[in-house]
Amino acid sequence: MLKLNYFFPLVFVILWSSAFITSKIIVEDASPFIALSFRFIIVAFIFFVFFIFFSERKLFSLKSVFEALVSGILFHGFYLGGVFYALSKGASASIIALIVSLQPIMTAVLAQKILKEFLSKIQWLGILIGFLGAGIVIASDLNDDLTILALCSGLVGLISSSIGIIWQKRISNDLSLSANNFLQALGASFFHFLLAICFENYFINFTTSFFISMTWQVLVISLGAFLILMWMLKYNDAGKTSTLFFLIPPVSAIMAYVILQENFTHLDVFGLFLSSIGVFIVTKNNSIK
């Protein structure tokens, strides 16, 4: 368990950061909501197969179904919908990653009010340092690519991911892992399909880059990073887990610079340093006062 507590956060940050890069590639060849609907119907099918053949618990209550569907709509629906839509409107991958990185601040506040979790003064200092680092990168990268519409979409993702983490900590969680993820993915797929029908001229161009990026998101992000997130939420506090999101923007910025040729400045490096220090302080001092 101790080794996993050190290994999983590192893997999670790298995988979750890569999602912003592949998302930017996907929306070049597909409208955002239909792309997400396509992604999660595949994910739902995979988890359904796991549920049928490997799950020992085949029965579950309507309450559990409802809780899983709500989680799916919060995490995969509003959060990813906001991110994909902002990217489709021209926002850079690094900027959107930076916007949703403010989630630990909101999650920490909500965790105190709802889950009765309490962060020590040193942990609050770490959160503020992480916030400052993320803010520096945001300020240095603001440009015409970040429109009001894209900003609002990113804020939708920010708010829904924070609420999703709190919700995940409160629910009974008596479903098997495969059943829970099947229902979450199924709910998200239908949610995005309805959005696609109602609000966009949906299309998918099955290019090589689309196929590679979508495969990465299905297998590595949905079946890897998200499962790691659920594991960390189960064994760690919500505030502590959410603080890892401070590391995602600078790591995403590095990936975007290398893969997408997006700008990466000295201020970005400084912001990365501060964010890393903030995360270290919060996760190192993990006692809840």
Image (spheres, grey):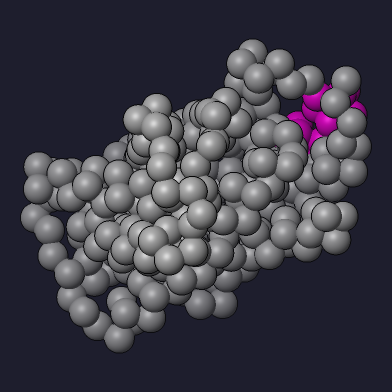
x and y, in percent, of residue 227 in the image: 56, 56
Evaluate whether residue 93 shows in this view.
no
Task: Decide which of 53, 221 is in the foreground and name it.
Answer: 53
x and y, in percent, of residue 98 in the image: 55, 48
* Residue sticking out furthest to the bottom: 208
In what quadrant of the picture does the N terminus appear?
Answer: bottom right
Q: Residue at (55%, 64%) from the top-left corner?
A: 224
Residue 104 sits above or below residue 138 on the image: above
Magenta extent: 119-131
The answer to if 120 sits in the magenta stretch is: yes
Residue 139 sits above or below residue 18 on the image: above
x and y, in percent, of residue 8 in the image: 72, 59
Residue 5's quadrant in the figure?
Answer: bottom right
Q: Is residue 195 left or right of residue 9?
A: left
Main SS of the magenta part reads: helix
Task: Decide which of 285, 136 is in the foreground and name it.
Answer: 285
Residue 108 sits above or below residue 16 on the image: above
Q: Residue at (15%, 44%) from the top-left corner?
A: 194
Q: Residue at (79%, 59%) from the top-left corner?
A: 4
The answer to if 128 sits in the magenta stretch is: yes
In what quadrant of the picture does the C terminus appear?
Answer: top right
x and y, in percent, of residue 253 in the image: 58, 62
Evaluate whether residue 40 shows in this view.
yes
Count of numbered circles on the image: 0
Q: Residue at (61%, 50%) from the top-left corner?
A: 229
Q: In this view, does 180 lie to the left or right of 225?
A: left
